Image (cartoon, grey):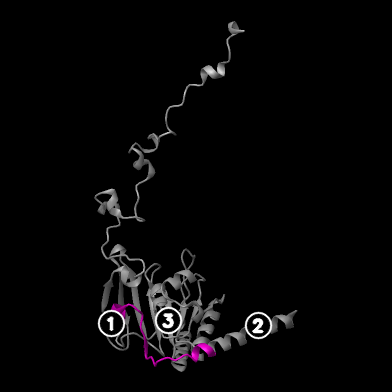
Amino acid sequence: MGAAVERSGLGVVEELRERIRQLQAAPRRALSVLRTGVDAVDALLPQGGLPLGHSVELCGEAASGRTSLALRAVASAHRELRLCAWVDGPKELYPPAAAALGVDLERLLVVRPRAFAQRVWSTVQLARSGAFTAVVLDLTLGVGAPGRPERLSLSEARKLADAAARGGTLVLLLTSPEAPADGLARLRLEARGVQGWSVELERSRGGGVGTRIVCPWRELYPEVGLDAGARMLDADVAEPGDAGPGFYRDPGDRVRNGLGILGQRPGRDAPMPALGDALAGPSPGGR
């Protein structure tokens, strides 16, 4: 039984190696940086993009855009016919959402180790191999997970930086503000409501520290078509029809007649006929 499982595992590894060789044989051009696909973010970085051979940190709260920005960078690498890997710590990477942002799932290797040390070790091995243009390490806990995220030690951060340099790979670290990492550069992402999201270059050896941009959500999610300053709140809507389809709809009771749940619905809320005569039965004199 054990020998059969071992042979099966070796077959999967050989198949993966052959697939990597085929994809690497495709014609590509030399890259020194990996663009995120968001022009404003690329202009914020001193190199004009995410530098290969280094570790870069995307730090932010949940729903700040850190995962989506990483997926946009992976999609940019896939457009260059390159491979990427994603070490999914919280196990929340959703393939349909990644594909919607342009990720080629056939060129993305997803690894989901259980222990924190195994995630770091996997990232080091993937980056050092040189087979992947970008390796994303998600160090967050995920939505609704209890506790605090584990923070990289100084030795672990150095191992990741060394592996990135040896393999010429971009190591993207997804972190939370309460547990930052020590990358070459750190981008702090924040959500700013319906107005958009902001990116600040919080750490960089190439200069530009402290610069910040604020972009509308459509820059990050062009497929959705959200516009900056779009009126999406009830207080901003003058008429019920101004909200647009799919955002805010009046409750069904208001649509009926404005009387709430006591309002009548044709054919359903009309007064019922009295049942007393039918339940009383025939009177004794009628026999």
Which quarter of the figure has residue 208?
Answer: bottom left
Pick whichever, 77 or 43, lies toward us.
77
Pick whichever, 112 or 61, lies toward us.
112
Label for residue 172? Answer: 3
Secondary structure beneath label 3: strand
At a point 46% along the width and 91% down the height, the residue shown is 162
Q: Nearer the viewer, mark 2 or mark 3?
A: 2
How many angstroms separate mark 2 from mark 1 (CA)?
44 Å
Q: Which residue is mark 2?
A: 9
Q: Residues within 10 Å of mark 2 (few under 14, many from 20)?
A: few
Label for residue 151? Answer: none
Disc nearer the start of the sequence (2/3): 2
At a point 26% along the width and 75% down the height, the residue shown is 213
| Residue 49 in sight | yes
Look at the image and give the residue range highlighted in magenta: 21-42
Task: Residue 72: give x, y in percent of width and height.
Answer: 39, 77
In the shown orientation, is residue 117 left or right of residue 61?
A: right
* Residue 244 higher or lower than 206, as above or below: above
Task: Residue 48: give x, y in percent of width and height.
Answer: 31, 86
Which quarter of the figure has residue 27?
Answer: bottom left
Q: Which residue is mark 1?
A: 43
At a point 51% along the width and 79% down the height, the residue shown is 106
